[in-house]
Amino acid sequence: MKERLNQIILNALQKSNIDATDINIIIEKTKDKSHGDYASNIALQLTKVLKKQPQLIAQDIIDNITDDSIEKVEIAGPGFINFFMKKDYLFENINEVLKVKENYGRVNIGNNKKIIVEYVSANPTGFLHIGHARGAAYGDALSRIKSFAGYDVTREYYINDAGNQMYNLGVSINARYHELFNLPMSIPEDGYMGREIIDIALAIKEEYGDTKLEADNNFFKEYGLKKLLKKIELDLEKFNVTFDEWTSEQYLYDSGRVLDVLNKLKKTDETYEEDGALWLKTQDHGDEKNRVLIKKDGLYTYYLPDIAGHLYKIERGNEHLIDVFGADHHGYINRLKAALEIFGYDRNILDVKIGQMVRMVRGGQEVKMSKRTGNAYSLNDLVSEVGVDAARYFFAAKSLDTQMDFDLDLAVSKTNDNPVYYVQYAYARISSILKDYNKEVSIDKYHTITSDYAFDLLSKIYQFPEVVKNAALKEMPHIVANYVYELANVFHIYYAHERVLTDDEVYTQERINLIKATAQTIKNALTLIGVSAKEEM
């Protein structure tokens, strides 16, 4: 409707011989119904250009508006134009929702532009923690929303399977394996001590007996990597998170991409040697300081394969790259953008999202350890305690760049204070009514829906495509999460004031379609943030 009003105003300006080429027409939904459905300050914007009072400009615009979707237009205050819309478009939208069903809200602002979203990318050396859970919920919801908005989205998990950490993983598993045969081995200081390392050693003993006591470190590393990656994949699938591509750091080395990047950089004047190390002049490209590519001991830094990995994303045809990193990765932003700029790309091709810290809270106290395992609180602990839906909704409802307290008590409560329960209960309530009615309904025109409660609900449903558009453009899934809560709230208010099932069949059928459209919109919105719509609660 905003787009339609925008065009209506442009047409009126043209008829009034007013040039608005450089004017951004702003149209807002009104908060006070007495001021109409939408308002624009276009007359105020044109005051300086036309050197005329805004009320007179507004009147010129109104005199040239002819559109059958508008009931009336008024001038308010210093020159605002208030639009009172006919309700036909809201009724037409009921049937549109019921026609397109799961596609309601889908928009095409992406024009199939190829983007790649990298998220989680946890080192395959242990379990997924709460920070990973928040990044997973955000990355997956963003990918769903972007796809729904017409982008060609690839979901990527970058596997850090090269370097010293993988060597230490192998050594740690080897040591635990030897301990099972009373042959103690020392674990390096920066080795891995988690329970999962012992479990992998036990799995090797069960599969191979003592035949791997003389095996080299590479066997234990590869065995552990495979097991841990599979565990990560399964834990994420349980969390409703999947990936299109699992890109290996080791592959970047084996395919020659890392060496190719290094050789290309050496041929430019962007590198220099100092203190026995090779540096890249990232400071000239907006970074806080220059970065080391090769340390004085001859080993590559993590920065070099990171550059190769991002160039590989572009090589695969992606036009926009989104990385979702943890709170400790803020320093990565400018160094990665600098590298892409050095290779001739617009630094804005890369967009880095930083997830802030999460505190798990129970009974008003911070929770750091799992009651079940005695270890640091993990994604699995969260899913076991509150379920996937509550976890996904709570993460989705907060902007990624803000710190958050995750209230475990609230997440499991079956009260209206729990937002995910409140939303799912709206859907379940509608499902129960539809089950009781259980008749086919076909309506072309709506005649009995007249209450403000119904129009509030219709208006909120109508907003959904615009919500999807805003969430996709701003890359903020919490816009969808907050919208679906508001939609559920408007439905609960409507239901408290107006009966659906009555002896009047026409009256009933019109409201059956209204609540069907409500349920479909709730379901579509929840799907975008990875939360299920439950028919029974």
Image (cartoon, grey):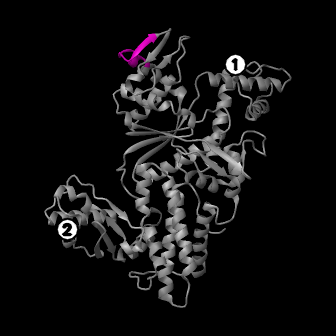
x and y, in percent, of residue 278 in the image = 47, 14
Which amino acid type is shown beneath numbered disc 1? Asp
Which quarter of the rendering shows the C terminus?
bottom right
The residue that mark 2 highlights is 56
N-terminal of the two: label 2 or label 1?
Answer: 2
Disc 2, SS: helix
Number of other residues with Cα within 10 Å of mark 1, as a class: few under 14, some 14 to 19, many 20 or more: few
State yes or no: discs 2 and 1 in contact (Cβ < 8 Å): no
Q: Which residue lies at the image location 44% right of the left edge and 10% below the top edge?
A: 273
Q: Is residue 475 above or below residue 89?
A: above
Which amino acid type is shown beneath numbered disc 2? Leu
Which quarter of the rendering shows the N terminus?
bottom left
Question: In the picture provided, is 8 more to the left or to the right than 208?
Answer: left
- Residue 452 seen in the current view: yes
Q: Is residue 193 above or below residue 453?
A: above
The residue that mark 1 highlights is 216
Q: Is residue 141 above or below residue 177?
A: below
| Picture quadrant of residue 346 | top left
Magenta region, residue range: 262-273
Disc 1, SS: loop
Q: Is residue 227 above or below residue 212?
A: below
Q: Which residue lies at the image location 74% right of the left edge and 29% below the top edge?
A: 193
Q: Nearer the viewer, mark 2 or mark 1?
A: 2
Which of the labelled discs sits on residue 417, or is there none?
none
Q: CA distance from mark 2 to mark 1?
A: 86 Å
- Taking the view exactly as shown, the residue that stands out farthest to the bottom is 503
Which residue is more in the foreground, 435 or 329? 329
Q: Which residue lies at the image location 69% right of the left edge and 43% below the top edge?
A: 378
Number of other residues with Cα within 10 Å of mark 2, as a class: few under 14, some 14 to 19, many 20 or more: some
x and y, in percent, of residue 113 in the image = 37, 46
- Residue 438 seen in the current view: no
